[in-house]
Image (cartoon, coloured by chain):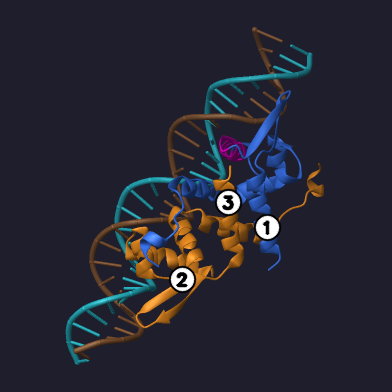
Chain colours: A orange, B blue, C cyan, D brown
Amino acid sequence: MKTEDHSFLKPETIEHISQIFKVLADPTRIKILYLLSQEECSVNHIAEVLEMSQSAVSHQLSILRNLRLIKYRREGKTLIYSCNDEHVFSLLKQAIDHSEHQ
Amino acid sequence: MKTEDHSFLKPETIEHISQIFKVLADPTRIKILYLLSQEECSVNHIAEVLEMSQSAVSHQLSILRNLRLIKYRREGKTLIYSCNDEHVFSLLKQAIDHSEHQ
DNA sequence: ATAAAATATGAACATATGTTCATATATAAT
DNA sequence: ATTATATATGAACATATGTTCATATTTTAT
């Protein structure tokens, strides 16, 4: 095939996809997202369940929050995080399915 | 929810998913995989079409090859690469669709 | 106003990753 | 055998990323 006959992805599309996959590429974030796919969670709850430091969880949540993959609401002193991007969670679920059934 | 009531991903599953997403997280590899989803390609063809050095392409191909995401056959001096993992290419396509229709 | 609890954040550090450069390997042609 | 072509690979380098540690911020209770 000649170069000019190829279909190319738009640079923005490539950047966007790369960014999404980058987020999904870290084991810690996979665990957090999988947890949030089951129930909304406070920061401390996530830290306890995943046996991580509060700080590490919070840093990761800030990454997910900045990319609008998750959202939160406040209950008193507590922030409750939950899913905010069906597409990305769907990618994660598809990857889990493929990985478990092979 | 109590910690013992959560569903957890198996460590191998987490590692596997993370590895797949890590591969898909690099713009260069996204371009290569997208190209290979359209047609099988020689190394030099990929390098020309994507305007990259032969060495850089070859390094990335070796990563994709080691993870069995692509395969190759020889034609004389030329190696022709092609897809070898429908699941992963399906993940890529889903991400592209989501990214383009939002 | 003060203290405690929950969360966020900046700096520092170690590790991982992608490209380049130089060179090696393999096949084909003469 | 020698040369040319196609591809692979190791080392070096720069950049990106995740965690920890210390500390800041925000809200509630007293």
What subunit carries mark 1? B
Name which residue lies at 81% across and 48% down: A4
The numbered dot on residue A97 is: 3
Name which residue lies at 45% across and 58% down: B7
Q: Position of residue B72 (x, y in %)?
A: 68, 32
Q: Earlier in the sequence, mark 3 or mark 2?
A: 2
Do labels 3 and 1 touch, CB within 8 Å? no
Relative vertical location of residue D15 with respect to residue D2 in this rendering, above or below = below
Left or right: where does residue C30 sit relative to residue A60? right
Left or right: where does residue A52 sit relative to residue A15? left
Q: CA distance from mark 1 to mark 2?
A: 28 Å
Do labels 3 and 2 touch, CB within 8 Å? no
Name which residue lies at 61% across and 52% down: B27
Q: Is residue B25 visible?
A: no
Tell which tag, 3 or 1, sits nearer the viewer: 3
Q: Secondary structure at mark 3?
A: helix
Q: Position of residue B16 (x, y in %)?
A: 51, 45
User: From the image, which quarter does the C terminus of chain B lie in?
Assistant: bottom right
What subunit carries mark 3? A
Residue where numbered disc 2 is placed: A40
Q: Position of residue D6 (x, y in %)?
A: 70, 29
Q: Is residue B44 visible?
A: yes
The magenta segment is B56-67
Residue where numbered disc 1 is placed: B96
Q: Position of residue C16 (x, y in %)?
A: 44, 46
- The residue type indicated by label 1 comes to Ile
Residue A3 belongs to the span the image colors magenta: no
Q: CA distance from mark 3 to mark 2?
A: 22 Å
Name which residue lies at 66% across and 47% down: B89
Do labels 1 and 2 touch, CB within 8 Å? no
Q: Are marks 1 and 2 on the same chain?
A: no
Depth check: A99 or B79 in front? A99
